[in-house]
Image: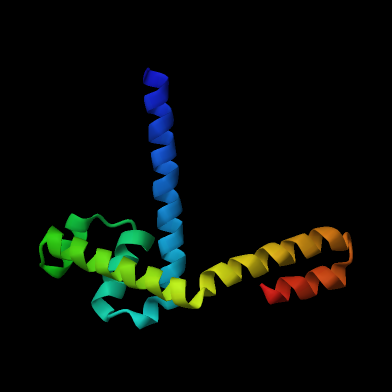
């Protein structure tokens, strides 16, 4: 039974890491569309690894207020991505470029041009 719990914890950590990476990418793509406060809190939380309490202390507000602002900002970022697909399209382009580089073999000039597209 303990082995299952370890696997669950491992999966949970991977999911949390995936969410953090995803939200950092969304913040990079759409952050300027958020309010200044949302952008600051999300940046500190996802990019600087601040806790809710640390952010609250920095801005002299409650941990709950930070939580609410972050959750609202996350929702907005996800809505922007659902409508515009900028992050998904960028990831797809990067995957295609990597595949083209693999298929091109040792063509240095082609690889150089593909790198410029990234």
What residue is rendered at 73% in x and 62% in y? Answer: 98
Image spot of residue 58 (x, y percent): 17, 66
Rendered image coloring scheme: rainbow
64 left or right of 94 in image: left
Image spot of residue 71 (x, y percent): 26, 64
Q: Nearer the viewer, residue 5 or 118?
A: 5
Q: Nearer the viewer, residue 25 or 50?
A: 25
Outermost residue to the front? 83
User: Count the marks: how many?
Assistant: 0
Q: Quadrant of the C terminus?
A: bottom right
Q: Quadrant of the N terminus?
A: top left
Residue 35 seen in this snapshot = yes
Image spot of residue 27 (x, y percent): 40, 70
57 left or right of 98 in image: left
Q: Nearer the viewer, residue 94 or 112?
A: 94
42 left or right of 83 in image: left
Q: Nearer the viewer, residue 61 or 4?
A: 4
What residue is rendered at 38% in x and 34% in y? Answer: 9
Residue 57 seen in this snapshot = no
Outermost residue to the top? 1
Q: Is residue 86 above or below residue 3?
A: below
**Image quadrant assignment for residue 82:** bottom left
What residue is rendered at 78% in x and 75% in y? Answer: 113
What residue is rendered at 43% in x and 49% in y? Answer: 17
**Image quadrant assignment for residue 110:** bottom right
Image spot of residue 116 (x, y percent): 71, 76
Q: Is residue 113 above or below residue 52?
A: below
**Image quadrant assignment for residue 80:** bottom left
């Amino acid at each position: 039974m303990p082995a299952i719990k370890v696997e669950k914890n491992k999966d949970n950590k991977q999911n949390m890491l995936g969410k953090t990476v995803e939200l950092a990418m969304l913040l990079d793509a759409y952050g300027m569309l958020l309010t200044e406060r949302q952008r600051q809190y999300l940046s500190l939380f996802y990019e600087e690894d601040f806790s809710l309490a640390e952010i609250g202390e920095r801005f002299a507000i409650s941990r709950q207020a930070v939580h609410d602002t972050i959750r609202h900002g996350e929702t907005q970022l996800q809505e922007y991505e659902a409508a515009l697909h900028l992050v998904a399209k960028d990831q797809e382009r990067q995957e295609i470029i990597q595949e083209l580089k693999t298929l091109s073999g040792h063509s240095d000039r082609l690889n150089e041009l593909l790198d410029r597209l990234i």
